[in-house]
Amino acid sequence: MKKLLVKKTSFLYDRIADKLRDAIEDRTLQPGDKLPSFDDLAKRYNANRLTVARAISLLKDEGYLYALPAKGTFVTDRPPRANGNGAAHDTFTVGCASRVMIPGQTGLYHLELMESIRASLGALHANFSMLPVNVDQPHSMLLGTVERANLDALLTIGPLDADVLTRLTRLIPHLVILDHDAPPEVPADILTFDNRRGGFLAGDHLLRKGHRHIAVITGDDQPVTQARLNGFRDALAQHHLAIEPDLIIRSDFREHGGVDATRELLEKRAAHPVTAVFYMNDEMALGGLSILRQSGLRIPEDISLVGFDNIRLTSSRYVNLTTVAPPLVWMGQLAVQWIDEYRRAPYREFRNIRLEPRLVERGSVLDLKPA
């Protein structure tokens, strides 16, 4: 792997940057590693914090490091692609930016999607660079990060403003948007799956099994939550039923959120004869499952569960969760296929495809219909 041509000087911050750069390139510091604090680096290199900050800033500009507010400074997933003269290497590099994927906080659904993307890019011998975006970070920082990364293509996962997506298309040759819709004027390929259909499948399955009092543990305030709730309402309407507002409990798509929401549900269950719960993702269902079992309830004899995402843990014998399965692996593979097609022959007719989810029936739903 070629190293950047760096002019050696007598400045201490340059020498610190050289040492850190060498550690990254020889993999002493691995992609995703968090750097020691400025104070610790200052002690290590017998320098002050300002000198360390200048060295870190230099490596950020070169694309070796990125910072997350209140979290620290991290090594990027790949070394920079430009040499000291600004010439690009002949490798192909794809970046990924997302507000829902923060180091240490990324959910299992997104981790499995990233596995598919990484494996598909690996088959193309392409480099991959993860560009995490803090939810509180201004859009200008994301745009600057993408511009400095010198990418051949960029994947975005989850919600980003249409204006930001449009501006991203001016910085990189090809943009693929995953898991989020965008206006038709954004010149990008868009790949989503039908969340409303998924909500319908979950509700319809429970209703066909005879359940009539169904609680719903929702995600936070984002389009995917509303789409899945609308699909659940569609299923109720098809069975000539209406939603029970008291049984809609808001959560946050995280396991601990499922724990808290399920505790709230158990308090309500004394007044509401709930026989089933639809969790809007599997991670919340895993949290809820632990609380339900701790409370002495049996799954599915006492209460039935349906999740959403079909993450790997749901197929284990201990969990055995009926769930809605987005075509996660195919989504990652198709996104990379589009990137490869565009690389070989750039096109202007961009695609917007919505994939269909399916229901995976396991052992967490009791059939209440008379034999």
Image (tube, helix red, strand yellow):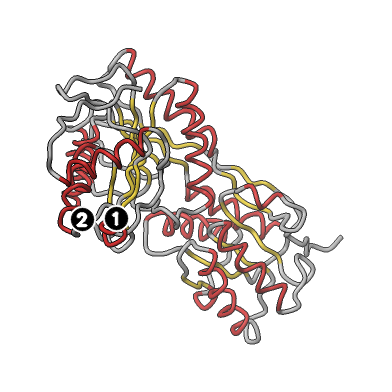
Residue 60 in percent (x, y) is at 22, 43
Q: Is residue 242 visible?
A: no
**Quadrant, the C terminus:** bottom right
* Residue shown at the point (49%, 75%) measured from the top left: 245
Amino acid type of the residue that numbered disc 2 sits on in the rendered structure:
Ala
Considering the numbered disc 1 on the image, is that residue within a helix, a strand or a loop? helix
Residue 311 in percent (x, y) is at 60, 48
- How many C-alpha atoms fall within 10 Å of the one at disc 1: few (<14), some, or many (≥20)? some
- Answer with the quarter of the image where residue 144 lies: top left
Residue 61 in percent (x, y) is at 19, 40
**Quadrant, the N terminus:** top left
- Marks 1 and 2 sit apart, C-alpha to C-alpha, by 8 Å
* Residue shown at the point (62%, 55%) measured from the top left: 204
Q: Which of the numbered marks, if any, corresponds to residue 41?
A: 1
Q: Which residue is mark 2?
A: 47
* Residue shown at the point (12%, 39%) measured from the top left: 10
